[in-house]
Image: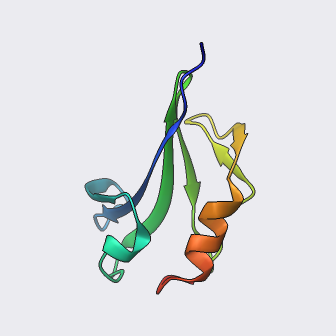
Amino acid sequence: MKSKPLYEWDIETSDENGEIIDHYHADKLADLPALEERQQLVLVMDDEQGRAWAYVQCGKLPEFFTDADDKRVDLVLRRFHKELEHSQFA
């Protein structure tokens, strides 16, 4: 039986070289603080195949999650697009 994917929102903080140095995870966007300099909002999906990411760009989620090799792995569910549209991050 296939297990359901797990989703969480994440604010990634990068250093001056672009390396990720910290994470702030939450189940709901409303639980996250406002973005600061060198921070990026991303929706993370964990499933049987591994971890994939959907980075918010210009207040919008992409259509698909991508893996560490930048390959499309799964569709970003409509509920996450709606959650973002009604948040401080839109």
Q: Nearer the viewer, residue 27 or 72?
A: 27
58 vs 68: above or below:
below
Please tell me which residue is depicted at 32% across the width and 63% down the height of the picture: 14
Return the residue found at the far front.
1
Q: Quadrant of the N terminus?
A: top right
Hey, which residue is sitting farthest left in the picture? 22
- Residue 24 lies left or right of residue 6; in this view the side is left
Question: What x and y, as percent, mark residue 29?
Answer: 42, 71
| Residue occupying image coordinates x 38% and y 58% | 27
At x 40%, y 65%, the residue is: 28
Q: x, y (%) of residue 35?
A: 36, 80
Left or right? Give the position of 71 relative to 43: right
Of 80 and 51, nearer the camera is 80
Quarter of the figure with residue 15? bottom left
Locate residue 77: give its quadrant: bottom right
Total numbered labels = 0
Q: Is residue 14 left or right of residue 73?
A: left
Q: Position of residue 8 (x, y in %)?
A: 42, 52
Quadrant containing the C terminus is bottom right
Question: Residue lying furthest top in this view?
Answer: 1
Judge from the rendering whether residue 10 lies leftward or rightward of residue 88; answer left or right. left
Query: What x and y, as percent, mark residue 79?
Result: 64, 62
Residue 80 higher or lower than 67, as above or below: below
- In the image, residue 31 sits, relative to residue 62, either above or below, namely below
| Residue shown at the point (54%, 48%) measured from the top left | 53
In the picture shown, does residue 74 fall above or below 14?
A: above
